[in-house]
Amino acid sequence: MLKLWNTASKKLEEIKPITPGKIGLYACGPTVYQRAHIGNLRAYVMEDLLRRTLESLEGFTVKHIVNITDVGHLTDDADEGEDKLEKAARDAGRDAWVVSKEYADLFTEDIRALNILLPTRMPKATDHIEEQIELVKALEDKGVTYRTSDGIYFDTSKYPSYGRFGGQKLEEKKEGARVSANPEKRNAADFALWKFSPEGQTRQMEWVSPWGKGFPGWHVECSAMSRMELGQPFDIHAGGVDHIPVHHENEIAQSETAYGVPYVNHWMHVEFLTVDGKKMSKSLGNTYTIDQLREKVIDPLALRYFFLGAQYRSKQNFTWEALEGAQHALDKLRRTVRTWKKPNGGLSEFETHFRNAIEDDLNTPEALAVLWKLVDSEYPSSGKATSLLFMDKILGLGLDVCVSKPLMVPVDIKKLADTRWDARKSGDWDTSDRMREELEGKGWTVLDGKDGYTLEKI
């Protein structure tokens, strides 16, 4: 049985579904004002790993919901500043609705490139304003809201458990809180449920509500849409560790106050990705995207392989050298399994060790080690092929298109590669480099060895 660390209880717990045989999984999705970067994508790969484990290893039917935040997420996560999407659209002189669709579509492209299973549904915040208004009404009826000049706020002092999810009691949060940018807030930790449109301004995205024209606070959408899709409580809520102290703390407070029952049974959080030992930030220019990987002729699945090299609760440091190492390892794996005989039988010893690793809090480094022990073993390749495909249903490296399937290279590509190899042998490096670039432009990468070369599809 899968044991997963629960952020709420601070311990490993077996996943026990509320409804036998079924799991409701909700993951915080992208705010679609810009392209998702590799730090964002690590969380989605790890959540996909969890889903694959629940389905392929544990036999559950999973309803997987990932929300699309297209309104309400302000530049300061603590409810101050501008709406990120409105600002991005205005700065670019574009329509906010067009911008949100563009980046939502790019997000879908990116997760497909990483072989992430498409969620069951990806509801957009702007499509469910009514449900969000109903949640705010429920909180108003409970007497835990108040009005300021810029919106309707949740009074965190009315929720005694506020702050404990993130490991800090409310009084401690107050003592350590910065001076609030909004002097009308009763408590520094209070958060917006509904924000009013600024006076004298017309937002591109705004709606009429019982409290005035405006838009929902960022935290409201996840509570409203998770309840709509999965009920309350539901089984597992996932996201990045950056969501713990504010976004998820606020979700819990408003959901449990509004409806009087627990919000979520199990919380999974993915640690940060650093780049060259530094925090990812636009100012450092290290918020890399899938397209930037492709510019360096890196297969997006090499990024997935790289992510699997660290357990999801560990911080991981990204470098281009490490990613190139992941690409070489994946290429070697693909070349090796292409030569195997067709799957037949299986090797229970390796499959059991793999299962034990994955069920131990998704221990992917150990799982990869088991996979390579299988690959390097002396067992018949037909048995290895069966067990490797069993493992890859969880790892998601797309090896099913390689196992026992020799790579078919078009005649023109083979001719170009042969000509390049001849140029390389004769020391004509300029021609060799130019032909390598030409091959890459046609979707092929060439790997040179001592006695020849091999080709791989990019």
Image (tube, helix red, strand yellow):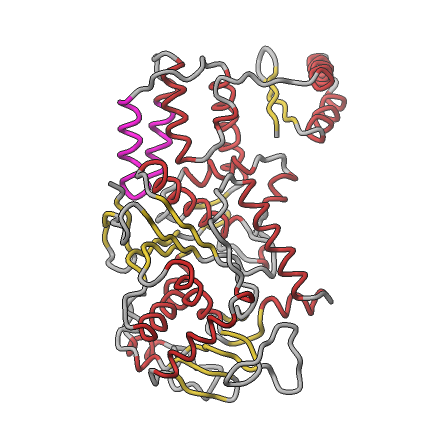
The residue drawn where x is 71% and y is 28% is 442
Residue 12 is left or right of residue 372, and the answer is left
Question: Which one is nearer the viewer's eye here, 351 or 313?
Answer: 351
Q: Main secondary structure of the magenta part?
A: helix
Residue 44: x and y in percent read 46, 48
Q: How many marks?
A: 0
Question: At 36% across and 36% down in the image, what residue appears?
Answer: 56
Q: Write down the quadrant of residue 206 in the picture.
A: bottom right
Q: Is residue 244 left or right of residue 297?
A: left
Please tell me whether residue 455 is drawn above or below residue 324 in the rendered image.
above
Decide: is 264 above or below 149.
above
Quarter of the picture holding the N terminus: top left
Is 458 displayed left or right of 25 in the figure? right
Q: Which residues are magenta?
A: 348-373
Q: Is residue 284 above or below residue 156?
A: above
Q: Is residue 368 magenta-colored?
A: yes
300 is within the stretch colored magenta: no
The C terminus sits in image quarter:
top right
**Residue at image location 58% in from the left, 71% down from the top:** 83
Where residue 99 sits in the image (x, y, percent)?
66, 61
Residue 20 appears left or right of 197:
left
Compare residues 207 and 427 and report the one nearer the observer. 207
